[in-house]
Image: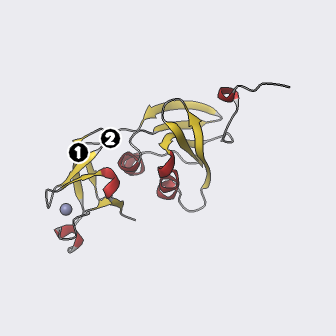
Amino acid sequence: MSIVDPAHVRQVEAIANGTVIDHIPADMTLKVANLLAQGDDQVFIGINLRSSRVGRKGVVKISGREIVGRDASALALIAPSATICIIRNYQVISKQQVEVPPWFDDIARCANPNCVTNHERWPTRFGVVVANPLTVRCTYCERSFDAGELSLLA
Ligand SMILES: [Zn+2]
């Protein structure tokens, strides 16, 4: 009988080039995959993987694309605890915690049905009130929301 150390078992297939989003809260994993997957992207998803840091976690791997800019900001809204690893030629060339930007511009819909952004075609804007747990305030109606209350714009 052999004893396998779980820390040394690769739980999701490695990718040659692209992005690995790790330490996603397990229940947000599919949301993250939906947010980041585009066109013909190959996406690998692991849910309920063991993690010493967050208990049960999710991992999403996007082959062939590096997640930066607006996509990374949107990620901060739904999985601020996640880490983003950029992979080139099977090597991790950068690994960092998702950065919560000071503003979320035109990324999420305001959850206040009376907010002007739900009636006029205005770009939405939320400022960060508390970074952890993430709480944001709509610039237009000035209501504050937990990040989980907001839905992302397409
Ligand atoms: Zn609003």
The quadrant in which the N terminus is found is top right
Please name whichever residue, 29 or 91, is drawn nearer the observer in this view of the structure.
Answer: 29
The quadrant in which the C terminus is found is bottom left
Q: Amino acid at mark 1?
A: Val
Ligand 1 falls in quadrant: bottom left
Q: Residue pushed farthest right? A: 1
Q: CA distance from mark 2 to mark 1?
A: 8 Å
| 149 lies above or below 65 | below
Q: Splitting the image into 4 quarters, where does residue 117 fall? A: bottom left
Q: Which mark is residue 88?
A: none
Residue marked by disc 1: 128
Asked if labels 1 and 2 touch by Cβ distance under 8 angstroms, the answer is yes
**Identity of the residue drawn at 52% across and 55% down:** 30
- In x, y percent, where is residue 62? 58, 48
Left or right: where 59 falls relative to 109: right
Left or right: where 102 falls relative to 151: left
Left or right: where 80 falls relative to 89: left
SS under mark 2: loop
Please name whichever residue, 141 or 121, is drawn nearer the observer in this view of the structure.
Answer: 141
- In x, y percent, where is residue 6? 68, 29
Residue marked by disc 2: 100
Task: Check disc 1: other Cα within 10 Å, few if <14, some if 14-19, many if 20+.
Answer: some
Q: How many marks?
A: 2
Q: Amino acid at mark 2?
A: Val
- In x, y percent, where is residue 94? 50, 31
Q: Is residue 8 visible?
A: yes
Left or right: where 123 falls relative to 68: left
